[in-house]
């Protein structure tokens, strides 16, 4: 039977995976449900503005590619400005914004995708947001590996905020006070990670459902699946891609590296 820590971890992982999948499928279904028609680019320009309350490493001056295009639906002319589906292409990197504008010229023909139920809602590029759907799926996969394998600590910070019943805590913690209540209420979180008399580097973890070489295989599969989530996003989404997707790659690699370090070092 799983400990309270691992049970909560498993439920949280499944919830993240389910919610991320629903959001991702919903976003993709909505975008692909748009109809296509021919349009004409009327103007191309670069807008810029300063975001004082949002300083970043790249600076707080943002650039917005501005493309105005027209298209006709059932004899009526519509004007559109959105380049990407469901998201702005603002960036604090002028070169990146310039690359977006380089795909359009005044008077050129473009394919416009519009909502059949609301023809005024249109876009040019099928670019998706990686957040929140992709991030939720990637986190769910990493937490799934953490919930089922030994010697991992990814959930300590989260689960330390969840109050556990005192009767659950007492049998697995050493009394540190006169009344038998431990000073550290999060000691229960170590229940499945280390038992009394075992060192931190021990491989023994009777509470972990998956151990030994299979734990390594499981973490590899979870990590590859998280990276696969990013790969699918890059395939179905047109540039400019969401930078959060690239950050997810780094987090996934670091996560598996941390598991390998604690496992072998």
Image (cartoon, helix red, strand yellow):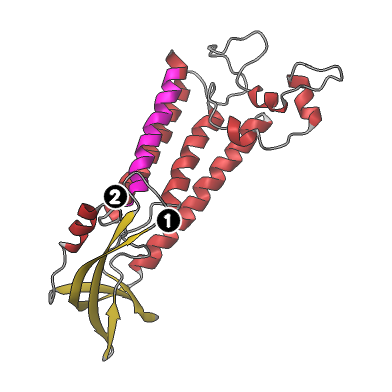
Please provide percent x and percent y for residue 142.
47, 36
The residues tagged by marks 1 and 2 sit, at their Cα atoms, a distance apart of 13 Å
Q: Looking at the rendering, in which quadrant would you find the C terminus?
A: top left
Residue 206 x/y as whole percent: 61, 19
Residue, x 41% and y 61% (percent of image)?
A: 27
Indicate whether 99 appears above or below 3.
Answer: below
**Can you give x and y, in whole percent of width and height, for residue 241 in the image?**
29, 52
Task: Pick the quarter of the image with the N terminus.
Answer: top right
Q: Which mark is residue 237?
A: none
For the magenta stretch, what is the residue range? 242-261
Residue wearing tag 1: 24
Nearest to the observer: residue 19 or residue 79: 79
- Quick one: label 1 or label 2, which is nearer the N terminus? 1
Residue at 63% x, 35% y is: 159
Q: Tell me the quarter of the picture where residue 258 sits.
A: top left
Q: Mark 2: which secondary structure? A: helix
Q: Image quarter for residue 115?
A: bottom left
Q: Which residue is more in the foreground, 88 or 259?
A: 88
> In the image, 20: left or right of 208?
left
162 relative to 71 in the view: left or right:
right
Horizontally, residue 51 falls left or right of residue 148, namely left
What SS does tag 1 mark?
helix
Residue at 56% across, 32% down:
147
Q: Which residue is mark 2?
A: 234
Drawn side of residue 57 relative to residue 180, left or right: left
Q: Taking the image as drawn, is residue 251 in sight? A: yes
Q: Quadrant of residue 62?
A: bottom left
Q: Is residue 116 visible?
A: no
């Amino acid at each position: 039977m799983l400990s309270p820590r691992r049970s909560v971890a498993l439920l949280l992982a499944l919830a993240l995976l389910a919610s991320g999948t629903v959001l991702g499928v919903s976003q993709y279904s909505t975008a692909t449900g748009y109809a296509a028609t021919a349009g004409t680019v009327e103007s191309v320009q670069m807008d810029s503005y300063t975001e004082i309350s949002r300083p970043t490493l790249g600076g707080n001056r943002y650039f917005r590619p501005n493309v105005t295009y027209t298209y006709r639906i059932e004899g009526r002319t519509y004007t559109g400005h959105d380049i990407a589906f469901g998201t702005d292409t603002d960036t604090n990197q002028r070169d990146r914004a310039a690359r977006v504008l380089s795909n359009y010229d005044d008077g050129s023909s473009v394919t416009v995708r519009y909502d059949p139920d609301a023809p005024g809602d249109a876009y040019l590029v099928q670019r998706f947001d990686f957040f929140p759907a992709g991030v939720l799926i990637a986190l769910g996969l990493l937490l799934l590996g953490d919930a089922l394998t030994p010697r991992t600590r990814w959930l300590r910070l989260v689960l330390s905020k969840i109050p556990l019943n005192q009767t659950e805590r007492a049998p697995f913690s050493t009394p540190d006070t006169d009344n038998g209540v431990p000073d550290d209420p999060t000691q229960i979180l170590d229940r499945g990670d280390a038992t009394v008399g075992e060192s931190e580097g021990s491989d023994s973890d009777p509470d972990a459902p998956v151990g030994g070489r299979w734990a390594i295989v499981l973490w590899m599969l979870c990590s590859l699946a998280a990276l696969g989530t990013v790969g699918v996003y890059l395939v179905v989404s047109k540039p400019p891609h969401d930078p959060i997707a690239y950050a997810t790659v780094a987090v996934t690699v670091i996560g598996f590296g941390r598991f390998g370090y604690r496992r072998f070092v």
